[in-house]
Image: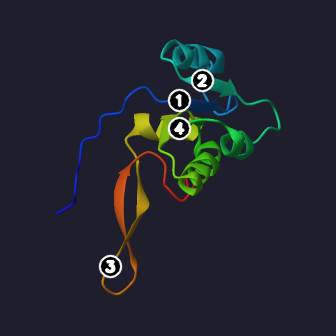
Amino acid sequence: MQDVRAYTFGRMRGLLLINPRSGTESPTAVELQDEALARGVHAQVLERGEGPAEPARTADTEILGAAGGDGSAAPVAGVAVARGLPFVCVPYGRATTSRATSGSTVTIPSRRSTPSGARSARSTSGASADGAS
């Protein structure tokens, strides 16, 4: 049986990194940024050629988030793990959006190992944790 606990957080500083080239036309990256700011979350739209890992690494924040596809979310998730911070993913990639609306599934590897040492997996809608589409 999996241990499931509910957590209540007070107000925490968050950073949402938005890849404007990942999303569809609606909402725009600026509209997404405005919504995050309205909810008290600092949001940064990445410039062309700017990767998400460095701003995630240097941010003075308590929660990291990424709005984009697998290529945007994975580096931010890696930084969050390395820094011991919670990570939030806002599915904003074109492929992510199409998979969600088409009902397709992908396999996500689990961190739990089977008795033989092989990794187990579960199937779900959306993007895979290893960055595969």
Between discs 1 and 3, the one toward the N terminus: 1
Q: Is residue 96 or residue 87 the one in the foreground? A: 87
Query: How much space separates mark 4 and mark 1, taking CA atoms?
Result: 5 Å
Marks 4 and 1 in Cβ contact (< 8 Å): yes
| Tag 3 residue | 114
The amino acid sitting under disc 1 is Arg
Dividing the picture into quadrants, the one containing residue 29 is top right
Q: Is residue 55 left or right of residue 77?
A: right
Query: How much space separates mark 2 and mark 3, taking CA atoms?
Result: 40 Å
Between discs 2 and 3, the one toward the N terminus: 2
| Tag 4 residue | 62
Q: Is residue 6 or residue 46 the one in the foreground? A: 6
Marks 2 and 4 in Cβ contact (< 8 Å): no
Marks 2 and 1 in Cβ contact (< 8 Å): yes
- Which element is circle 3 on? loop
Q: Is residue 111 above or below residue 12?
A: below
Dividing the picture into quadrants, the one containing residue 11 is top left
Dividing the image into 4 quarters, which one contains the N terminus? bottom left
Q: Nearer the viewer, mark 4 or mark 3?
A: 4
For the point 22% across and 57% down, which residue is it?
A: 3
Between discs 2 and 1, the one toward the N terminus: 1
Q: Is residue 89 above or below residue 108?
A: above
Label 1: few (<14), some or many (≥20) within 10 Å? few
The amino acid sitting under disc 4 is Glu
Residue 112's x, y, as percent? 36, 70
| Tag 1 residue | 13
The amino acid sitting under disc 2 is His
